Amino acid sequence: MLDVESDKIKTRLLPISVYQKQFFLEWTLAPQETKYNVTLGYKITGNLKKSFLKKACEFVIKENDILHARYSKCGEICYYMNYSIDDFYHEITLDKSEDVDQKINSIINQPFDLTQDVLVQGFLIISQQNYYLVIKAHHIIADALTAAKFCQHIEKYYNALFNNHFVTLDKYSFDELIESEKILLSKQYYKKSKYFWRQFIENITLKLKLPYKNNLVRSNRLEKYKSNSVDFEINQADTFRLKNYARENKATNFIILSSLFASCLYRYTNQNFFFISYPVDMRPKGFKKAMGSFVNNIFLKFDLEKCDSFKNLVAFFINQRKEIRPYQGYPLINIIQDQREINQANINNLFNVGFAQANLNTARIQLLDAEVTALSLSNSDAIYEMSLLYDEYSSNHIKLKITYQEHLFEKQLIDNFISSFKCLFETAVEKKNFNLKSVNILSQDIYKKIVYDW
C-alpha cells in the first residue's frame, strides 16, 4: 500500500456503477488478495524522454475522473481526490545488486486498499541503463479495455510531445455514463432478467468438478492460495486458419476458442452439463471507449445432449450468446443470490472456471526513438480455480494463458490440458468437425488418471 498524504482533498463525489459495487464487495471479502490487480509492463531501451513519459501519464490521468477515485469504508460513496501526478507516478532507480524482476513482482503483487490508496499507479524503474514501465490498477476502476486505452493514450501524447504537436483525446462524462446505466438497469429489466437466469441455470450445479490432485477440494473460499500460469500462443499461420474457420462457421474467435476450452473440460471431467464464466463489457451505447470498469460476469452453458459434435457446439454457443445478450447486464451478485434462495447453496458453490478475452500485453507501445518490449506479468492470486485467457490485440498471433491454483492441480495435468487444447484446435481446423465423445485427445497416462485413478 502506498501512503498518500492526509491533506489530499475529497473535492466532489463520483457516481458508482453497479458493477463497481460488485468489485468492492469482492474486495471486502479478501482485501489482501491481488486477483483484481490489472497490470501492464514494458521494457524500454534507447533514448527515452523521461519527462515526456511522465507528462503523458499526467495528461491521461487528468482527462479521466474515474482514475482519481477513492471509496468510503462502506463502499457506498466514491470520492474524487485532488491527486497530483506525483501521487500516481513513481520513479525508482535500482542499484546493481537489486533484481528488477523481483522488484516488479513486489509491485504488482501488492494489494490495494480501496479506501486509502491511489487506485492506478505507474512506476518507471531504472536498472542498468534499461527502463521498465509498470502500470497497475484495481479492477474496480480499470478493465481490460481501460488498460489498453491507457497505454494507447500514453503513446499518442508522448509522441505528440516528441514532435511538438498538439493532441486531444476523446473525453466522456462519467456522470452521464452512470445515468445511462441506470436507465438500462430498470426494475422491469431486473425482473425479466431474474426470471431468464433462473430458467437458464435450471438445476445444474454452478461449480464444475475438476480433476483435482489427490481428490483435493477447496474448503474455504476465503483462504489464500498461490496461483500459477502457463503462457502459450497460436502462431501467425494458425491464427489465420482459426479466423478462416470462424468465418466459415459465422462465428467469432471468442466462440471458437471457448468451444475448444469447453470441449477439453468435458473430456477431462466427463460432465455432460457445466458452466464457464466469462466477462462482458456493459458500457452503455455512446460510451464504448470510456475508461473505467464496466464488467459483468455471466456464463456459457455446456450441454452435451444438445451438442454432441464440435460444429454443433459452436452453433449452440452462437445461439446461446444471442439468447443471453438482452439479459447480460443482470449483475452476477444477483444471479448468485437468486440461486442461494432457490437451492440454499452455500458460499463455496460458485463458478470456478473462467474464460475471457484479456489484455495480456501483446500490443506494443510505440514510443519515438525508443524500443519497447512487452513483459509477461502474472499476479500471485487467481480469480478462478482454473481459467483460460486469450489476447488478440496483436493482429498476427493470439496469446493464451491458463491460470490455475497450485494446490489443486498437478502441473503435469495442466501441461496435458494445454496439449489437448492444441490437439483439438488442429483437429477442428483440419477435419472441420469431430465427435465430442469419441475424439482422442488424452495420452494413455492422463486417461488412466482421469478414468481410473480419479
Image: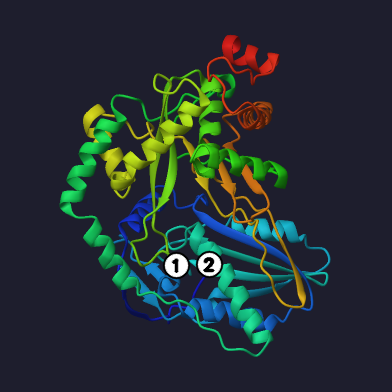
Q: Residues within 10 Å of mark 2 (few under 14, many from 20)?
A: some
Which residue is tagged 1?
291
Residue 165: which quarter of the image? bottom right
Identify the colour scheme used.
Answer: rainbow
Label pair 2/1, CB-CB below 8 angstroms: yes
Q: Amino acid at mark 2?
A: Lys
Q: Secondary structure at mark 1?
A: loop
Inspect this view and state whether residue 279 appears: yes
Decide if residue 331 is on the left or right side of residue 290.
left
Task: Specify the farthest residue to the front.
Answer: 248
Inspect this view and state whether residue 14 appears: no
Q: Amino acid at mark 1?
A: Met
Query: If you read the primary sequence from the N terminus, does the residue marked by circle 2 or circle 1 appear first?
Result: 2
Q: Determine whether 185 is above or below 265 in the image.
A: below
Nearer to us in this view, 183 or 347: 183
Which quarter of the rendering shows the C terminus?
A: top right
Q: Determine whether 416 is above or below 77 in the image.
A: above
Q: Secondary structure at mark 2?
A: helix
Q: State the residue at coordinates (40%, 19%).
A: 305
Nearer to us in this view, 70 or 294: 294
Residue 335, label in figure: none
Q: Residue 273's x, y, as percent?
A: 41, 23
Q: Residue 183's x, y, as percent?
A: 22, 61
The count of marks equals 2
Q: State the residue at coordinates (48%, 33%).
A: 314
Task: Specify the farthest residue to the top.
Answer: 452
The residues tagged by marks 2 and 1 sit, at their Cα atoms, a distance apart of 7 Å
Q: Determine whether 233 is above or below 207 in the image.
A: below
Which residue is tagged 2?
149
Q: Residue 417's x, y, as percent?
A: 63, 28
Decide if residue 94 is on the left or right side of residue 387.
right
Q: State the residue at coordinates (30%, 72%).
A: 175
